[in-house]
Amino acid sequence: MHISPVLWQFLVKWLHASALFPAEASTIAPWMDALYFFLLAMTVVGVILVGALLLAFSLMYRKEKNPVATHIEGSTLLEATWTIIPLAIFLVCFVWGALLYFRIYSPPVNAMNIYVVGKQWMWKAEHPGGQHEINALHVPTGKPVQLTMISQDVFHSFSIPDFRVKREVIPGRYSTVWFEATTPGTYHIFCTQYCGTQHSGMIGEVTVLTPDDYDKWTKESTSGMSLAQNGERLFASMGCNACHSGTAAARGPNLAGVYGSKLTLTNGSQVLVNDAYLRDAILNPSQHVTAGFAPIMPTYQGQISEDGLIDLVEFIKTMPNNYRVQQTLVTSQSDQTTPAAPGMVK
Amino acid sequence: MSTSTILNLPDQATATIPKKNYINAEHGILSWLLTGDHKRIAMLYLVSITFFFFIGGAFAGLIRLELLTPQPDLVASDTYNKFFTMHGIVMIFLFLVPSVPATLGNFLIPIMLGAKDLAFPKINLLSWYLYLAGGTLTLAALVLGGVDTGWTFTTPLSTHYLNTHVLTAATAIFIAGFSSIFTGLNFIVTIHRMRAPGMTWFRMPLFVWSNYAASILMVLGTPVLAIAIVLVALERTIGIGVFDPTKGGDPLLFQHLFWFYSHPAVYIMILPGMGVISEVISTFSRKRVFGYTAVAFSSVAIALFGFFVWAHHMFIMGVSNYSALVFSLLTMLVAVPSAIKIFNWAFTLQKGSLTFETPMLYAFGFMGLFTIGGLTGVFLGSLGMDIHLTETYFIVAHFHFVMVGGMLMAFLAGIHFWWPKMTGRMYPESLSKLAAVVTFIGFNLTFLPQFILGYLGMPRRYHAYPPEFQVLNVLSTAGATVLGVGYMLPMIYLAWSLKYGAIAGNNPWQATGLEWQIQSPPLTENFLVTPIMDHEAYDYEWLAHKTEQEVTTVG
Amino acid sequence: MANTIATTHPEVVHGHHAHDEHVVLPQHRHHFETEEQQREAGSFGMWLFLLTEIMFFGGLFFAYLLYRNWYYPAFAAASNQLSVPLGAFNTVMLIASGFCMALGVWAAEVRKKGFLVLMLVLTTVFGLVFLGVKGIEYHEKFEKHHVPGASFSISEFVNPPIDAKTGKPTEEPLSPDMAQHTQLFFFLYFAMTGMHAFHMILGIGILVWLIVRAQKGEFSEGYVAPIENFGLYWHFVDIVWLFLFPLLYLINRHPLH
Amino acid sequence: MAEHIKHHDASNVTNPEHAEHHIVSPLEYCYVFAFLLVFTAITVVAAYFDLGALNPILALAIASTKAVVVMLFFMHVKYQSKLIKMTVGAGFFTFFVLIMMTMADYVSRAWGTW
Ligand code: HEA
Ligand code: HEA
Ligand code: CUA
Ligand SMILES: [Cu+2]
């Protein structure tokens, strides 16, 4: 925060120490808190105003002092005052809140992506480098982190109060949230959407590490295979490579470099290829037929888990050319460790 | 007459309860169960909603008891989930929605309009039976093993993942919904068609206005809840897929339909309470409500705008960000009419001649607590803030402030205010003042800590929580105990007063409403002669004049 | 207020005089000042009830709108499974039934007892024919495994039957994932027409009761409120069908090649 | 009917929501009946022509016209008090709020995150 950092720090630290206030552990937290203090001030002023009116009138006009009431019809001026002033204040709340909402829900382009799968009743985090965590999440300080989240069953909600971020984890649809942690330490992860019996057990810890520690952690906890490598294996074993072979005669469109591009579909509409699009195109291919191709792709609904889909999406995302695809076609030995594709995180 | 009260009771030595009144007009249990008299139906409702309030309250007690410690030690987690689900369902659908309209509204609206009954007495009775059927089914769901969906029935959780008695509870709500549709319908027709000669729209008491606004919401909103519930039931039984993402359905569609009702429902809950506050404030300041038309129209404005903001319950749940923006803006607009009301009530006190009987104390409680509750609603309506606060105890605190601090206080204000009219007897004043104060203190102790808990991030519907939240939770539980005592007291002394209370006479508060000009308890047909309204509502000069004349003619 | 027929209404014996100034027919409820007030209250109440019905069907209509936009090909193909001739025939039946109902209201207003009874009977008959045809249609869906649920089959949409004359499929084949969504169409079809049929069955129940009362001459002496109000209900049910017919049977129909 | 109109109640006449009871003639009903049948025929026939985006629009327009006619005449709305007209209006208004505002969410979801 720019407004008098010293005072702010003092206030927040003091409140936090007396357990009235959560830690400010992300870049967004001070912004959220500023709005909070504004709203709090509005409430305090409002309540004091109403309270003072009640108290003053009660003292001044109680029956002992004012035995006979004086008739007053009303006052347009006063009505207008207490229509317009609250309205103006509320509109400020709206604009301020909307700006904050923009910030929290539009990840910066350079954010590193981590996938989160929610299911009754655990969180699974999947780092692109292949690190898997359950009910835990390791992130570095000073780097924007985007979470791409999906639920395997019901609505969950991924919440880190100390970062002031939260987003619903929806069945059948990716949702995203981002943050940039500032202070190393461990913080709560809660599932805040009621999701059945063990809802209150669907908790975890996010561990914020300095960049160096984070590097160390990624090296130590890698499973040996990146998500994209898992995806590649799936790509071959599900037979995707038969059609999406990248050759001129292929029956399916070439997937290399497709991520982030604009596609024209058979029905003439243009779409941006992002994670959500890729996932949907695998599950409901007939609604996403690229122009020039026949709707022959079978649906994979119910055949791939959300984790598998994430692997595939990550594979397609990081596929610069069709070299690996052709390799898999030739050797069909996709399960051997392969050198990581360039551009992949760790 | 003491200078600190307007209470004006007849001479207790000679006073009697009128020989003929609606209570003793007929005898026997059947004469109650088959009655068409709106006043008797109101009493039936009063008894039944009180019963359900204590059921809901018992669950609240169990919730707070479990949350005394961070560990999940009192009950298993699915039992806890059933607790808050039953607490929510019972409190909302079986207590708060029917509370003021079905008891006080039923009793008073025809009288305030100068009519002999509601337009459709049989439908009114039917409403009560539907309510009872809904209540019985809820109890059945409870006895059979409970439900654990939460009162919001979120799909696909409720449709595919829970094997508790969702269907029973859903049917219960469906039926109770029709009870409230019929109540609303009855009120609207009565208000349009049954007004006494001279009772123009702008001579109606504000209580009638706010019930009218609430009725519109009941009639137009509740059917959407009904269809949403039918779809949930079909999804559960035959797996139709409208809410099932694996079959191409959209689970959020349910929430759109649910909140299309349930947001207006919160105004169904608060508006009649606001009506009570208007009556009480006016009576105890001996003045017409400041800005009568503004207060009347703000009720209608709340009802109208109430239909445009439902998606503020879904801000982070996957609605498009654009529509979140629109709904947030509209949420800010809907908050304004409530502010208008609060300030008009406050200025009603100005230059009044105030006394502080129990109903007035509750009304003051309402104003303070509703202001806090309402303004914290603005926190939630502010998009960015809602991200952090949604689904935490902040929300729990918000809605208890408006529903318990606001509406329940208003309900108690109304019950005390009209108790002499309904029963012919006064409640004991000092005990009731004590109860009001205890309730106020207990309430704040219970729910203020929850705001802090919410900002700290404690999620709602949690059976166990991290130990650092314990202190505030202990405070909250302690408060709930005090609050429980505060609610038990009226139960006891009101029952006591039925037999031993002072005889109230026609108009103990010297209030202006038509209901105060007839005997207490009223006759079955309310008025011997159809009244002719020739003055504004809250015209204390008219009342003084009338009293003077009565004194001269009698004396 | 010229009229001064003293009341002998059983419920107002405890002699208050408010009623003495008004005509009191036997069906006049004591809490209304005038019979006219009662009639207007009744019809207003009925209208409010219809409002709730609009909102009730509104939820279903919205679900239809949403999924039709999402899964247009599936909805088009599934809609083509419905028989337009049967649907159109049923539309005519309902319109005829509504027409008879309207005439029935008129008959009651001008106090023609015989005609009223006849019209009510015709209304019922047309309504029953509608339900019968609906039953036939439901039965066909059942045979073709188009009832959503475990036995639902998408084979007809994935491999449409070949037209003997042209040698081409009668329909564009759907891919399996899209074909799955025909189930949503059929569910909405059953939910909407089922809810509609349910209202009709209720209505026919009431009609039978009204016929019996009309036969006794209860509605041909100036007391027409029940007939009028039931008419409102019946026409409302018609209106729902007027939308269901194009939405379910026609809107997705593309000219067959 | 005609009989009790002359016992018009003074207290009720002051009620602006009151309208005279109007009896619609059978002939009028016959016109309406014919109108509905003709429009049913049109809508069925129109469905077999490929009009592109106009197909659903036309079908809904015809359905709405028919519904309005039924309401105005069979249901006597044309001869009812303002109150009843407003009631009908309120119903459709709320219905449109439900449809439009919900649809707004679904439509704008496709616009991307922001
Ligand atoms: C009686 C019930 C009631 C009432 C009246 C309200 C009133 C309001 N509510 Fe509340 N609400 C609930 C019951 C109620 N609510 C419930 C039960 C839930 C949770 C449901 C669940 O998930 O289980 C909820 C949840 C809820 C949410 C969703 C949160 C979430 O899930 O993320 C939101 C968001 O916008 C919200 C907002 C509001 C607003 C803006 C008002 C406004 O109408 C408030 C207006 C009032 C005022 C603003 C106070 C008066 C103003 C003044 C005196 C002016 C003061 C002076 C100055 C401005 C200086 N409420
Ligand atoms: C009208 C509505 C209403 C009312 C009056 C109340 C009243 C109270 N509520 Fe409730 N509450 C809701 C509506 C209401 N609530 C809703 C809608 C939810 C959300 C549910 C959901 O998430 O789905 C909720 C949820 C809710 C929670 C959150 C649970 C969770 O998320 O995990 C809590 C926790 O403190 C709580 C507490 C209380 C308390 C202490 C009271 C007190 O005011 C109650 C005081 C009354 C008494 C204490 C009764 C006195 C009677 C006795 C003492 C007799 C005892 C008898 C026996 C024990 C046999 N409520
Ligand atoms: Cu997952 Cu709560
Ligand atoms: Cu709301």
Image: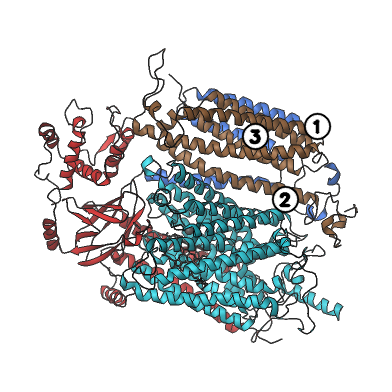
Chain colours: A red, B cyan, C brown, D blue
- Left or right for A90, reference B33: left
Is label 3 on the same chain as label 2? no
In front: mark 1 or mark 3?
Answer: 1
Residue occupying the point 76% across, 50% down: C38
Chain of the residue displaying label 3: D
Which mark, residue D69?
A: 3
The amino acid marked with disc number 2 is: Ala
The answer to which of A141 and B24 lies nearer the viewer is B24
Q: Which numbered disc, 2 or 1, marks the residue that appears first in the sequence?
A: 2
Chain on which label 1 sits: C
Provide the chain ID for the residue under circle 2. Answer: C
Q: Find disc 1 in the rendering and name its residue.
A: C114
The label on residue C41 is: 2
Q: Is mark 1 within 8 Å of ligand 1?
A: no
- Identify which amino acid the numbered label 1 is placed on: Gly
Tell us which disc is closer to us: 3 or 2. Answer: 2
